[in-house]
Image (cartoon, rainbow, N blue to C red):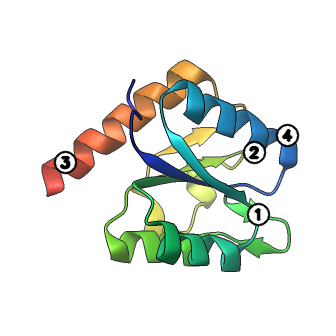
Amino acid sequence: MPLAGRKVLIVEDQYLIADDLSELVGDLGGDVIGPTSRVVSALAAIRSEGPDLALLDVNLGEELVYPVAAALQAAGIPFLFTTGYDAAVIDPRFRDVPHLVKPILKGRLAQAVRELLSRAAEQD
């Protein structure tokens, strides 16, 4: 299980998608933090919960998730975008961050998480 023993922050504003992601993370052995649908609560979760990695939707209704991405990047916490957006519209600061296009399938998430964790381990 690629997420065994890892805390995963989920930032997603659509309830059903957040619920599906939570279930997928659980199926892959992870412990879900959140889900949260707002930048302020995601930033608070980073400070208080210390996630091992994060799944971020780009568009959170009236706000974009980029302050959360910046905080994760500064803290050295790996993350990926789970979005309906094409990579070309993602903020240039985060163009190298992996992203999965919704709907997210378990196999694709498992593979992306393995690659993300492997890449993070190589950087340490």
Q: Residue 14 carries which label?
A: none
- Secondary structure at badge 4 equals helix
Relative to 65, say whether 85 is above or below: above
Marks 2 and 1 in Cβ contact (< 8 Å): yes
Marks 4 and 1 in Cβ contact (< 8 Å): no
Label 1 vs 3, first from the N-terminus = 1
User: Which residue is more in the foreground, 89 or 38?
Assistant: 38
Looking at the image, can residue 13 be seen?
yes
The residue under the point 75% across, 45% down is 18
- Secondary structure at badge 3 equals helix
Label 2 vs 1, first from the N-terminus = 2
Marks 4 and 2 in Cβ contact (< 8 Å): yes
**Residue under circle 2?**
18
User: Which residue is more in the foreground, 43 or 98?
Assistant: 43
Badge 4: how crowded within 10 Å, few (<14), some, or many (20+)? few
Label 3 vs 2, first from the N-terminus = 2
Relative to 97, say whether 31 is above or below: above
**Res 61 → quadrant:** bottom right
